Image (cartoon, rainbow, N blue to C red):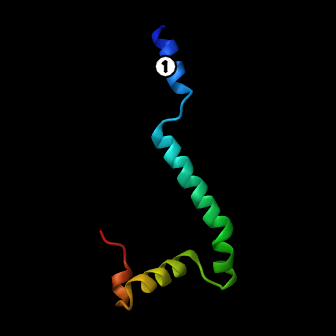
């Protein structure tokens, strides 16, 4: 086999990274399709929901503790 033939053969199979990315993309699309509509119907935005999720899992926190670290 020639080098080009080997490259073309390997190209037919998706790499593990691409496969994982596609799975995450499908999961994100499912979340957007099924989870976001009820959240927006309640008048909440994405950031509102994230703050509520943090409070649910970590309990009461000072307002400045919600900032991204960095």
| 64 vs 23: above or below | below
Of residues 31 and 47, which is closer to you in this image? Answer: 31
Which quadrant would residue 59 be assigned to in this image? bottom left
Q: Position of residue 45 (x, y in %)?
A: 59, 78
Q: Looking at the image, is 49 positioned above or below residue 11?
A: below
Q: Is residue 51 above or below residue 15?
A: below
Residue drawn at 45 percent across, 11 percent down: 3
The quarter of the picture where residue 65 lies is bottom left
Image coordinates of residue 7 in percent, x first then y, are 49, 19
The residue that appears at 52% across and 43% down in the rendered structure is: 19
Mark 1, residue position: 7
Q: Specify the farthest residue to the top.
A: 1
Front-lying residue, 65 or 10: 10
Q: Secondary structure at mark 1?
A: helix
* Residue 33 pos. (x, y %): 68, 65
Compared across the picture, whether 69 is left or right of 15 comes to: left
Q: Quadrant of residue 26?
A: bottom right
Question: 29 above or below 9?
Answer: below
Q: Which of 35 and 49 lies nearest the eye of the viewer?
A: 35
Task: Count residues near mark 1 (Cα–Cα under 10 Å), then give few for <14, some for 14-19, many for 20+.
Answer: few
Could you tell whether 45 is left or right of 34 in the image?
left
Question: Left or right: 4 with respect to 69?
Answer: right
Left or right relative to 68: residue 4: right
Q: How many marks?
A: 1
């Amino acid at each position: 086999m020639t080098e080009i033939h080997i490259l073309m053969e390997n190209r037919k199979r998706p790499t593990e990274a691409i496969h994982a990315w596609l799975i995450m993309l499908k999961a994100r699309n499912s979340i957007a399709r099924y989870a976001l509509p009820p959240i927006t119907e309640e008048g909440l935005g994405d950031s509102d929901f994230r703050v509520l999720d943090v409070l649910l899992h970590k309990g009461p926190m000072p307002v400045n503790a919600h900032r991204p670290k960095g």
